[in-house]
């Protein structure tokens, strides 16, 4: 397919990867929108919020290498789709599970 007939594979790949990156950054940035809400809702101190944020970034950073090894067997397109679905599910988990509320409330009673 030449360039006059439509987008080249390189252009489509760039647009797809850019949109996926923006979506994933949106999930990461949503954490900062939720922190003040969680602080008010659960009565957390700044130290409790720091624990939540540290666990998020520690988990995200710690799972990058195992995820890379696990996704080597699939195509880059499938890896992007799978990781987007997983990120979306992880973003929805705190809002839909009662255990997360109990865990957050337990942070309130700990001294840091």
Image (cartoon, rainbow, N blue to C red):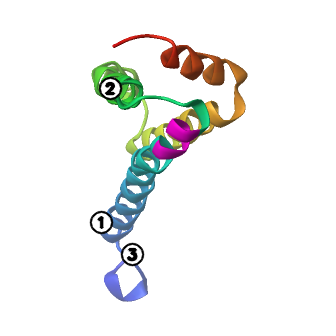
Q: Is residue 22 left or right of residue 99?
A: left
Which dot marks residue 93? Answer: none
- Where disc 3 sits, the SS reads loop
Is 20 situated above or below 108?
Answer: below
Q: Which residue is mark 3?
A: 1
Q: Is residue 23 left or right of residue 51?
A: right
Depth check, mark 1 against mark 2: the one in front is 2
Depth check, mark 2 against mark 3: the one in front is 2
Image: magenta residue range = 36-40
> Cα distance, mark 1 to mark 3?
12 Å
Q: Residue 57 is drawn in which quadrant?
A: top left
The residue located at (33%, 13%) in the rendering is 112
- Where disc 2 sits, the SS reads helix
Which dot marks residue 54? Answer: 2
Q: Residue 71 is drawn in which quadrant?
A: top left
**Residue in the foreground of this view, choosing between 111 and 50:** 111
Residue 99: x percent and y percent? Answer: 67, 18
Residue 59: x percent and y percent? Answer: 37, 22
**Residue in the foreground of this view, choosing between 24 and 6:** 24
Q: Residue 101 is drawn in which quadrant?
A: top right
Residue 19: x percent and y percent? Answer: 42, 62
Q: Main secondary structure of the magenta part?
A: helix
Q: Is residue 98 magenta?
A: no
User: Which mark sits nearer the N-terminus, 1 or 2?
Assistant: 1
> Cα distance, mark 2 to mark 3?
48 Å
> Cα distance, mark 1 to mark 2?
37 Å
Q: Are the residues tagged 1 and 3 within 8 Å (C-beta)?
A: no
The residue located at (36%, 89%) in the rendering is 4
The residue located at (30%, 66%) in the rendering is 10
Residue 12: x percent and y percent? Answer: 39, 67
Which dot marks residue 10? Answer: 1
């Amino acid at each position: 397919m030449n360039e006059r007939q439509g987008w080249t594979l390189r252009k489509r790949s760039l647009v797809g990867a850019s949109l996926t990156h923006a979506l994933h950054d949106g999930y990461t940035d949503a954490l900062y929108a939720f922190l003040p809400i969680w602080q008010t809702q659960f009565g957390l101190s700044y130290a409790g919020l720091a624990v939540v944020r540290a666990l998020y970034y520690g988990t995200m950073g710690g799972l990058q290498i195992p995820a890379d090894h696990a996704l080597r067997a699939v195509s880059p397109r499938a890896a992007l789709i799978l990781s987007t679905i997983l990120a979306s599910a992880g973003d929805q988990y705190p809002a839909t599970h009662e255990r997360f509320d109990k865990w957050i409330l337990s942070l309130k009673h700990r001294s840091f």
